[in-house]
């Protein structure tokens, strides 16, 4: 290595910047781990992502030590060893490579980019702590200028004070993230809403001359540690009635007492459920965080008196924030809190750490149930995952096969009625188990079901022969566009209309109640 190169790689500013970006690399990779590690490992070998992470950590430590030696040792500053420039060059090359890997990871996360940014934001205090320790342990003692030392100390003190203050009182303005979403659970309504920080939740209304204030609670203990709040209300209490929601911010819960903040309360919502024979329902599927595009399509769909959310709100349910933004807030935005929602879980709602808490958060006992709108019988089935339980993507935490067998046992216990019947399920396959598929479609025939409303495949079509029962595939996102559907029930049959976000008609079909396409 020539003298110029040796001087460049041994320069104090260069070594400092290399150590800075070297420390940033593993944190960036770790922020992307939720959506990218498993896919990288499947392409290369299981454990590669972890190996890469620890190589980044080792490079960060090595780069920091080299920088510290360069800054702290006078002899090193006067005559650094020849090998030091080579070592510093290696760390710079590795840091550059890891930066490219990090950028590729971010690009590869796709719709999970929001999750990566959230993870990165949560790791910011760790990075700042690492940076401050490195500065004060290795570099600060080498700063000879008195004014510069005082400036550094003042900046550190201010950062520390604000960090401590924000840790105790997070700087979040407390508000509702959207209107509530009212989910029909099959036994009652679950009024669900989200707030910008943790707190309590309640629903207040009057019924039969009595004022009710019902909290989100368990066995008398009010839940104050969630941003999603759900309160179950009897059908008759909410139909054709008004209600409001409220919440008190909770900073911290102690064994005795706690620290609380302001209380907020909404305006009144006028709620109504479809009760006539002619009724239109919005069907929305597979929005995968693309709520803006979905809303553009919905604006062109016309009027509707209820919503069927067919699942796949995001790439996974890794955190409460994802459920709050892409299920609760999105549902509130498209209903205004004044019409009911039927929620069918998608396969991407089964993934991530928060997936096990989702049903409780939404106030639902389970994701398969039946209900009635305007005299029509709606049966919701839960296809859950679209792969077998041993798939590496589930990390050994899937037991959906047993769950689906419980569901099919429940489904087969249902009795036929005079009501016109519609089956709702995220995936028209219903299950990955062949015997469950056969049993499910046999029961649909026995119940006289007319159609299956589903999503999952990201295209819009009315399929007459592919499945045992005529099946409508709602569009969702695809190719930069988004397709939403309006399904109208009447005595004559089912009218299916779909359009994209530009308002262009994608599909318009009519199906009779005996399951034949009439137009």
Image: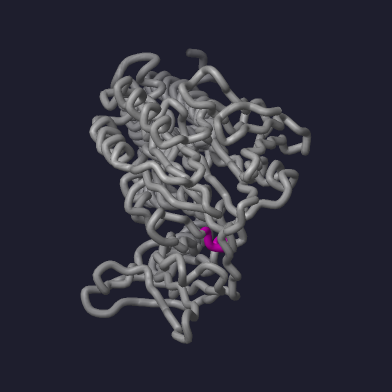
Magenta residues, start to end: 177-181
Q: Is residue 179 magenta?
A: yes
Q: Residue furthest bottom?
A: 209
Residue 300 sits above or below residue 269 on the image: above
Query: What residue sits 48% from the left and 28% below the top?
Result: 105
Q: Position of residue 483 (x, y in %)?
A: 66, 35
Residue 337 sits above or below residue 482 on the image: below
Depth check: give the residue in front, 447 or 92: 447
Depth check: give the residue in front, 67 or 164: 164
Depth check: give the residue in front, 340 or 348: 340
Q: Is residue 90 magenta?
A: no
How was this image coloured? one colour
Residue 447 seen in the current view: yes
**Residue 39, picture quadrant:** top left
Query: What residue sits 61% from the left and 56% below the top?
Result: 276
- The kind of secondary structure the magenta stretch mainly shows is loop
Query: What residue sits 57% from the left and 67% below the top?
Result: 271
Depth check: give the residue in front, 21 or 151: 21
Q: Position of residue 203 (x, y in %)?
A: 46, 73
Q: Position of residue 175 (x, y in %)?
A: 54, 68
Q: Is residue 495 left or right of residue 76?
A: right
Residue 316 seen in the current view: no
Q: Is residue 337 left or right of residue 482?
A: left
Q: Image quadrant for the C terminus?
A: top right
């Amino acid at each position: 290595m020539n003298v110029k190169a040796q001087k460049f790689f041994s320069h104090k500013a260069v070594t400092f910047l290399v150590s800075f970006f070297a420390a940033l690399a593993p944190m960036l990779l770790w922020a992307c781990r939720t959506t990218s590690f498993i896919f990288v490992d499947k392409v290369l070998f299981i454990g590669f992502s972890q190996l890469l992470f620890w190589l980044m950590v080792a490079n960060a430590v090595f780069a920091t030590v080299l920088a510290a030696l360069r800054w702290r040792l006078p002899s090193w500053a006067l005559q650094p060893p020849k090998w030091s420039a080579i070592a510093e060059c290696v760390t710079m090359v590795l840091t550059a490579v890891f930066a490219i890997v990090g950028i590729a990871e971010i690009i590869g996360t796709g719709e999970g980019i929001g999750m990566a940014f959230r993870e990165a934001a949560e790791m910011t205090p760790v990075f700042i702590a690492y940076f401050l320790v490195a500065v004060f342990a290795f570099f600060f003692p080498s700063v000879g200028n008195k004014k510069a030392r005082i400036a550094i100390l003042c900046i550190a003190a201010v950062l520390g004070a604000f960090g401590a203050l924000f840790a105790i009182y997070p700087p979040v303005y407390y508000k509702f993230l959207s209107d509530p979403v009212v989910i029909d659970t099959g036994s009652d309504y679950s009024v669900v809403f989200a707030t910008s920080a943790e707190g309590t939740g309640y629903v207040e209304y009057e019924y039969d001359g009595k004022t009710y204030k019902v909290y989100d609670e368990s066995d008398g203990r009010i839940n104050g540690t969630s941003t999603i709040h759900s309160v179950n209300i009897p059908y008759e209490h909410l139909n054709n009635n008004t209600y409001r929601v409220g919440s008190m911010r909770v900073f911290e819960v102690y064994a005795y007492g706690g620290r609380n903040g302001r209380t907020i309360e909404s305006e009144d919502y006028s709620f109504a459920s479809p009760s006539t024979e002619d009724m239109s329902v919005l069907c929305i599927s597979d929005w995968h965080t693309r709520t803006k595009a979905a809303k553009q399509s919905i604006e062109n769909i016309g009027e509707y008196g209820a919503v069927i959310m067919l699942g796949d709100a995001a790439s996974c349910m890794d955190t409460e924030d994802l459920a709050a933004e892409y299920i609760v807030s999105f549902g509130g935005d498209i209903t205004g809190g004044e019409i009911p929602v039927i929620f069918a879980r998608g396969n991407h709602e089964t993934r991530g750490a928060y997936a096990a808490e989702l049903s409780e958060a939404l106030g639902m006992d389970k994701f398969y149930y039946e209900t009635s709108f305007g005299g029509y019988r709606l049966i919701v089935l839960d296809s859950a995952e679209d792969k077998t339980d041993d798939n590496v993507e589930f990390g050994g935490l899937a037991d959906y096969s047993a769950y689906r067998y419980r569901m099919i046992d429940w489904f087969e216990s249902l009795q036929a009625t005079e009501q016109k019947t519609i089956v709702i399920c995220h995936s028209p396959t219903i299950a990955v188990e062949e015997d469950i598929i056969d049993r499910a479609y046999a029961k649909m025939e026995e119940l006289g079901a007319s159609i299956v409303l589903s999503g999952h495949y990201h295209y819009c079509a009315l399929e007459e022969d592919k499945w045992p029962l005529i099946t409508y595939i709602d569009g969702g996102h695809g190719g930069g566009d988004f397709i939403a559907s309006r399904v109208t029930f009447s005595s004559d049959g089912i009218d299916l209309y779909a359009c994209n976000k530009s308002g262009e008609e994608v599909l318009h079909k009519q199906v009779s109640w005996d399951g034949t396409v009439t137009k």
